[in-house]
Image (tube, rainbow, N blue to C red):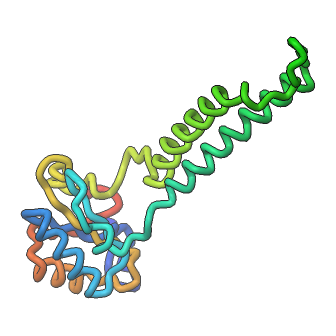
């Protein structure tokens, strides 16, 4: 095998991890529980639809995105108020019928619009950043059957970066859990 460089664990340095396919969402959920029980922590699942209970089984924390969206909305509201206060009260003060120069009631429509706008941008950009998207290449794309994850395939991957990763242990756990097509994935495709 050309270009093989063994590492401390006996794997090639370009090893991404190992991936296995499962027949159903239930089997995948049970496999995740078994993999976590075996001590693996750097795992991911790839399915065509969300599976109820998968986040808990994988040990994932709650999403931080709602807090980012709240901050984006508050920033939108604050910027709308500051912008209108500056323009109407100081930069171009326009007195009409004895009304106060700084009138917060008039700020509501623009405040609402900028709150929604900043929240939407924060939600989209935050989601892309937290999901590490766009990602034009991922080592799992080298797996010949991985394209099925968006149609009818249920996959689990264990990364070689996991402190407990051992190819033989990972294969054994995945096989015991009912995995098929258990494949070692390299960072770069073999030529």
Nearest the viewer among 149 and 27 is: 27
Quarter-of-image position of residue 160: bottom left
- Say above or below: 100 vs 182: above
**Residue 111 location (% of width, % of height):** 66, 32
Q: Residue 69, percent across and down?
A: 55, 48
* Tally of marks: 0
Quarter the C terminus occupies: bottom left
Residue lying furthest top:
97
Among the 4 quarters of the image, the one containing residue 41? bottom left
In the visual, does 21 lie left or right of 39?
A: left
Above or below, 45 relative to 36 = above
Q: Residue 36: which quarter of the image? A: bottom left
35 or 109: nearer the viewer: 109
Q: Residue at x 30, y 70 (%)?
A: 17
Q: Let me know if residue 4 appears in the view.
A: no
Spot occupied by residue 30 in the image (x, y as percentages of width and height)? 16, 75
Quarter of the image with the N terminus in it: bottom left
Q: Residue at x 58, y 50 (%)?
A: 70
Which x, y percent locates residue 165?
A: 33, 82
């Amino acid at each position: 095998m050309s270009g093989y460089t063994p590492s401390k664990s006996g794997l090639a340095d370009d090893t991404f991890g190992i991936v296995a396919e499962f027949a159903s969402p239930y089997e995948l959920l049970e496999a995740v529980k078994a993999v976590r029980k075996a001590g693996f922590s750097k795992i991911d699942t790839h399915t065509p639809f969300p599976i109820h209970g998968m986040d808990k089984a994988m040990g994932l924390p709650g999403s931080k995105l709602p807090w980012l969206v709240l901050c984006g909305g508050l920033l939108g509201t604050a910027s709308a108020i500051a912008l209108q206060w500056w323009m109407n009260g100081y930069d171009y003060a326009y007195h009409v019928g004895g009304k106060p120069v700084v009138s917060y009631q008039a700020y509501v429509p623009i405040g609402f619009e900028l709150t929604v706008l900043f929240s939407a941008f924060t939600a989209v950009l935050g989601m892309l950043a937290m999901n590490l998207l766009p990602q034009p290449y991922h080592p799992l794309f080298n797996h010949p059957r991985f394209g099925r994850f968006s149609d009818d395939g249920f996959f689990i991957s264990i990364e070689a970066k996991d402190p407990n990763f051992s190819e033989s242990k990972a294969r054994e756990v995945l096989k015991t859990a009912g995995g098929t097509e258990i494949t070692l994935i390299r960072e770069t495709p073999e030529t």
